[in-house]
Image: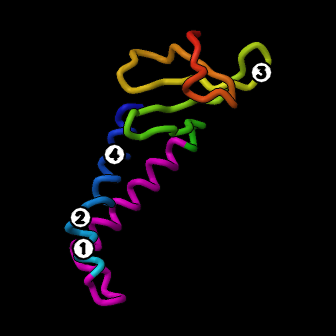
Amino acid sequence: MLARIKRLRAARERLEDEEAREALTGAAPGNGGGAHGRTVSEGFVELRSALGELQAVDVVLRDLERGLVDFPSLREGQEVYLCWEEGEQSIGFWHGVEDGHAGRRPL
């Protein structure tokens, strides 16, 4: 999971590259901004790909900066989310669908 989060962060950095964004703003319409356009485009494609991978395994990204993800699950017959945050050794918390991170409880 941590590797996917790191990929998402790297992709976001390419999208937020100020030099690339400024060059694209000044680029003539239709030329894509050359190397800078490629930087931003690759960042977008990578971000989209990594998010798609998470969705394919039913992982919900809640906060990229914190590395917070939820995993849909059932607990005592109710829909809940298992919750993991970067730095935690394993999935050790859960919360109700409406509760969010603030409602985390130990498993």
* 30 part of magenta stretch: yes
Counting labels gives 4
Mark toward the viewer: 4 or 1: 1
Q: Is 61 rendered above or below residue 81?
A: below
What label does residue 78 carry, if any?
Answer: 3
Whole-number angstrom distance, CA of label 1 to CA of label 2:
6 Å
Specify whether 16 is left or right of 48: left
Mark toward the viewer: 3 or 1: 1
Would you say the residues marked 1 and 2 are in contact, meaning their CB atoms lie under 8 Å apart? yes
Residue extending farthest front:
102
Determine which residue is flagged by label 4.
9
Mainly helix, strand or loop, the magenta region?
helix
Whole-number angstrom distance, CA of label 3 to CA of label 1:
49 Å
What label does residue 22 carry, if any?
Answer: 1
Whole-number angstrom distance, CA of label 2 to CA of label 3:
45 Å
Q: Residue at x 38, y 55 (%)?
A: 46
Q: Position of residue 33 (x, y in %)?
A: 27, 79
Whole-number angstrom distance, CA of label 2 to CA of label 4:
15 Å
